[in-house]
């Protein structure tokens, strides 16, 4: 399935490049023009760090006309190595997401700080990002198809299971390609940028602006953590508002953090229940499940080795603590246990005790 979607993405982008689209300004901003210091230019190390892609701003220069005649949509396609295979993940951000954040008829900046991919471990190789800004006509059919494609893209949220994303990616492309072929969607600006770890600067956190119009990229800068500005002749800096644009960022981080959506999370709950069990075999089952959890973490394409080891040490300490609590509280009544244990641990003890009925 992954290979099929990779081919579909390649065909889709090649078909777009064959058309006659307005020439956009593409500004990959130097880290020295991004503030606060350190927000860009940080190296994303192979097998030790995670990367994510975020739409920092979607700006519509004439928002009122846009929303009377068209619906805006942004397609972001991220291509990278996941596990041991190259994958392509398309994400569509459209009017539904925009209205949820900014109301019915936004002007100017209509979308800010929207995560569209990641965090995923950087496994080396080439990371490519395709960004496209569209306007979709307000025909009933076009609007319905756009809304459907966007709802499919956003239904499972970010971060999400890559396997599920790969399954729905083709549906997202189908909907958008249908709108383009029928003439109901028009690309305003599009580009593809590649990041290569072997390059002089390596794979680093960065900002890129896709602007529908001619602008001197040397005058642009990012301030306030993700707002696009332009240098004026008098030495002042103002918000850039001369054309429609999409500003997006590639972010790096050392730890994924959230793991509750990963497959081994269910096993962790099972190990907790076993550690709190009063049965003779409870701790044996907890240790066996702990080993299975670690095996899954080590081979997980969603975790770096360092973070997997850290999570494992923390989880092992948690299970040992639960075991000691269960031993200390063995002589107490169920009512006393509920007073001493945390609400979550107390519920687990109660669920285990139900097995003795």
Image (tube, rainbow, N blue to C red):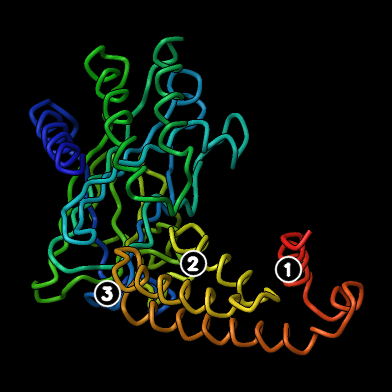
Q: Nearer the viewer, residue 100 or 207?
A: 100
Q: Say which quarter of the image contains residue 165.
A: top left
Q: Residues within 10 Å of mark 1 (few under 14, many from 20)?
A: few
Q: Is residue 91 above or below residue 355?
A: above
The disc at residue 44 is: 3
Q: Residues within 10 Å of mark 2 (few under 14, many from 20)?
A: few
Check disc 3 and report its element: helix, strand or loop: loop
Residue 3, percent from left and from top: 14, 42
Q: Which residue is mark 1?
A: 344
Query: Upstream in the sequence, badge 2 or badge 3?
Result: 3
Q: Is residue 223 above or below residue 78?
A: below
The disc at residue 57 is: none
Q: Is residue 148 above or below residue 158?
A: above
Q: Nearer the viewer, residue 300 or 131?
A: 300
Q: Nearer the viewer, residue 270 or 160?
A: 270
CB atoms of marks 1 and 2 within 8 Å: no
Q: Which residue is mark 2?
A: 224
Q: What residue do we see at 11% from left, 32% from top?
A: 11
């Amino acid at each position: 399935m992954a290979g099929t979607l990779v081919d579909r993405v390649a065909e889709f982008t090649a078909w777009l490049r064959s058309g006659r689209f307005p020439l956009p300004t593409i500004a990959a901003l130097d880290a020295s023009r991004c503030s606060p210091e350190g927000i860009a230019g940080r190296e994303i190390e192979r097998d030790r760090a995670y990367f994510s892609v975020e739409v920092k701003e979607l700006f519509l220069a004439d928002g009122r006309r846009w929303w009377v005649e068209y619906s805006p949509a942004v397609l972001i396609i991220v291509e990278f190595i996941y596990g041991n295979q190259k994958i392509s993940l398309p994400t569509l951000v459209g009017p539904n997401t925009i209205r949820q954040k900014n109301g019915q008829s936004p002007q100017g900046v209509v979308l800010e700080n929207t995560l569209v991919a990641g965090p995923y471990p950087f496994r080396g190789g080439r990371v490519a990002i395709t960004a496209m800004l569209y306007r979709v006509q307000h025909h009933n059919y076009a609007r319905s198809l756009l809304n459907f494609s966007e709802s499919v893209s956003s239904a499972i949220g970010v971060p999400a299971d890559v396997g599920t994303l790969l399954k729905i990616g083709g549906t997202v492309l189908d909907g958008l390609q249908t709108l383009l072929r029928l003439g109901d969607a028009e690309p305003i600006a599009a580009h593809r940028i590649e990041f290569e770890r072997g390059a002089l600067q390596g794979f680093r956190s960065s900002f890129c602006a896709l602007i529908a119009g001619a602008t001197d990229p040397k005058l642009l800068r990012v301030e306030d953590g993700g707002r696009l500005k332009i240098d004026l002749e008098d030495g002042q800096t103002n918000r850039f508002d001369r054309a429609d644009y999409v500003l997006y960022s590639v972010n790096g981080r050392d730890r994924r953090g959230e793991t509750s959506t990963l497959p081994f999370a269910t096993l962790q709950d099972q190990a907790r229940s076993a550690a709190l069990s009063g049965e003779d075999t409870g701790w044996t089952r907890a240790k066996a499940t702990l080993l299975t959890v670690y095996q899954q973490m080590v081979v997980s394409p969603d975790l770096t080795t360092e973070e997997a080891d850290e999570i494992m040490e923390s989880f092992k300490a948690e299970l040992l603590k639960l075991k000691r609590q269960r031993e200390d509280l063995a002589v107490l009544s169920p009512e006393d246990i509920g007073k001493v244990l945390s609400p979550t641990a107390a519920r687990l003890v109660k669920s285990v005790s139900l097995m003795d009925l």
